[in-house]
Image (tube, grey):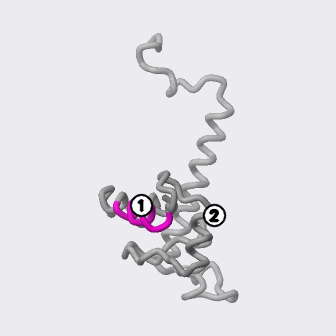
Amino acid sequence: MYGLDDESLKEVSEHRKAEVVRKTLEVFDQNKDGVVERDEWMSLWKSGKRLEDFGLGEGHHGDDEYEYEIHHFERFHDENTKEEDLIHPEDIAHFRKHDEMEAEAERQEELDRMPIVEQNIPQKFRRY
C-alpha cells in the first residue's frame, strides 16, 4: 500500500502495517477482490467515505522531494532562503539523502562502464 514502505515508518511493525491494509480494504474494496480499484475509491470518496487516521504520521502526498517541500521547507523557509540558511536537521537529512543518491548513481554508472563486474561473479566461479 502506498506510503507504508516509507523510511519514516521503519519502526512500525509489519503487523501494524498489515492491519492498516486490512482496514483500508474493509472500507474501500467493495467487491472484496483484495484490490481497491479506482472506481471503488472514487465512488466511496464521493459519498463522503474517508480513511481513518491510523496515527502513522502526517501522510504522504508525493515523492520525497514534495514531502520535504510541503512538510518542512514551506513551513520554515521561503523563496528568499539561501542555501547556507538550510541548517535544520531536516534540511541536513534531506540534502544528505541527495548526496547518497548521487554517489550511488555515480557508482552504478562506473559499474555500467565495466565489461565484467567481478563482484557479480559468484566466488565458486572465480579462478583465483
Closer to the eye: label 1 or 2: 2
Front position in the image: 121 or 59? 59
Three-letter residue code for mark 1: Val
- Residue at the image position 41 percent from the left and 60 percent from the top: 21
Q: How crowded is mark 2: few (under 14 residues within 10 Å), some or many (20 or more)?
A: few
Q: Return the x and y of residue 73 as percentages of the image width and height.
A: 58, 82
Q: Tag 1's secondary structure?
A: helix
Q: Return the x and y of residue 23 as percentages of the image width and height.
A: 39, 65
- Residue at the image position 66 percent from the left and 34 percent from the top: 112
Q: In which quarter of the image is residue 39?
A: bottom right
Q: Is residue 9 left or right of residue 101?
A: left
Front position in the image: 21 or 102? 21
Q: How crowded is mark 1: few (under 14 residues within 10 Å), some or many (20 or more)?
A: some
Tell which residue pokes out farthest to the top in this image. Answer: 127
Q: In this view, does 16 lie to the left or right of 64?
A: left
- Dot label at residue 4: none
Count of marks placed on residues: 2
In the image, the segment drawn in magenta is 19-28
Q: Return the x and y of residue 120 as percentages of the image width and height.
A: 51, 26
Say which residue label 1 marks. 21
Q: Does the magenta stretch include residue 26?
A: yes
Tell which residue pokes out farthest to the front in this image. Answer: 31
- Dot label at residue 39: 2
As measured in the structure, the alpha-carbon distance from the residue carrying label 1 to the one carrying label 2 is 18 Å
Q: Is residue 45 magenta?
A: no
Three-letter residue code for mark 2: Asp
